[in-house]
Amino acid sequence: MNKLVKAMLHNKNIVLGVCGGIAAYKACELTSRLKKQDANIDVIMTKSAAEFVTQLTFQSLSLNQVITDMFDKPKHWEIEHISLAKKADIIVIAPATANVIGKLANGIADDMLTTTVMASKAIKLIAPAMNTNMYENVVVQRNIETLKQLGYYFIEPSEGRLACGDIGKGKMAEPELIETKIKELLLKPQDLEGKTVLVTAGPTIEALDPVRFITNHSTGKMGFAIAEKAVSRGAKVHLVSGPSNLPTPYGVERHDVESALDMYDAVMKLMEKADIIIKSAAVADYRIAEVSSEKIKKSEEEFVIKLKKNPDILQELGKIKGSKVLIGFAMETQNLIENAKTKVAKKNLDFIVANNLKTEGAGFAADTNVVKIIDKSGNVEDIPLMKKSDLADIILDKAISINK
Ligand code: PMT
């Protein structure tokens, strides 16, 4: 693997933007690490970065000219920022200050770094470093969210003692972690190129009257993670989601729905073009039999609601799936394997991802999951506690191996 990483980074052009902050010294280590991987590094320093580390340091480590002020060399700057913007495979800003993040999120390009970033279609990775209160400031968080939605990748700062003496989140991620993330972004397989993936996520809500509804605790995290990973691996992705506050992953086509019947309609419209269908949504099995058009008034001590069965979307898909890969989820509180196996057979699935609500770190709302993947031959694979984003890759790997 190391040989492959080295060989592939050999041709990679990395533009490293360094902003003013004490973490600028860690950018030196990052430069050195990337250089050892045979990457070509061009460093752009902001004026304030040059107050912390010298141009000469980065020049010596990168073996390239280091750019600071775009007016340093009149007549050359325009060519340089455009050529670096075009040449870059990835632009990494480490450390990134609230100032530069704010400029990028709001279209301000007033120095060499911001003009280069805005003129570039390369992958962008940002490693923020700043005081905790500043990092948690709603404006900074809003700017980060804006950039994420525009496809910028972020590597979160860690917690610890900051240069200002405060203890909290704001330390730039370690160079080793940034290096790993760069490799992940530059070397990730495009093994879903040409494929269409249909993912469902979140809960459904079933109205009782104009004011009330029944629903469940799904947040959409699992399905959104799958959609995001599928796009990053080259797929065209349709995400049919019940109500969820999560931002749409960059590049994903989102279709918002509310009830199980809405989800059924959306999925049936989109399924034909899909090569892989992954149903991680928590769909209500029942809806209210008679939805009141007016708010139901309080009266008797007991109030009985009559429910009506919803269509089982996954089961319907199983009847017409043909050669498509069909993957279900199973949320259980007991007899996980038995129940999940029954669902694989009944719904004609290629495999099912089963999670138990009672397992620590699994199921609703968490950033992690613990699952068993059960295929149609009855093989059971234990997947330990891991981030939903990592599980998403495992599910996609398995789907691709079936879709070949
Ligand atoms: O969204 P998060 O907060 O990240 O939580 C993730 C999750 C817990 C919702 C997810 O991991 C999960 O388990 N999703 C499936 C939940 C569920 O509805 O399980 P089930 O065993 O009731 O349904 C089995 C399968 O049939 C599911 O793929 C479901 O989408 C599908 N189904 C169920 C009922 C129905 N009417 N139509 C369906 O398509």
Image: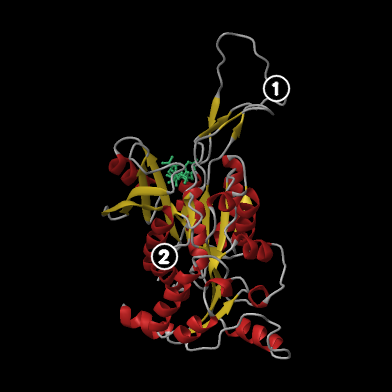
Label 2 SS: loop
Scheme of colours in the image: secondary structure
Q: Residue furthest bottom?
A: 75
Q: Is residue 71 left or right of residue 326?
A: right
Q: Tell me which corner region of the image, top left, top right, bottom left or bottom right, holds residue 252.
A: bottom right
Q: Amino acid at mark 1?
A: Lys
Query: What residue appears at the point 72 percent right and 73 percent down from the top-left corner?
Result: 110
Q: Is residue 85 left or right of residue 345?
A: right
The yes-or-no answer for disc 2 within 8 Å of ligand 1 is no
Q: Give 50 or 5, whichever is nearer the viewer.
A: 50
* Residue 128 vertical position relative to residue 372 in the rendered view, above or below: below
Q: Which residue is mark 2?
A: 174
Q: Which residue is mark 1?
A: 295
2, 155: nearer the viewer: 155
- Provide residue 343's location: percent of width, then percent of height: 37, 45
Residue at mark 1: C-beta within 8 A of ligand 1: no
Mark identifier at residue 169: none
Q: Residues within 10 Å of mark 1 (few under 14, many from 20)?
A: few
The residue at 45%/62% (across/down) is: 173
Residue 13 visible in the displayed image: no
When the figure is inspected, residue 77 is found, relative to residue 385, above or below; the finding is below
Where is residue 117? Give x, y as percent. 63, 74
Which of labels 1 and 2 is toward the front? 2
Residue 97, percent from left and from top: 59, 63
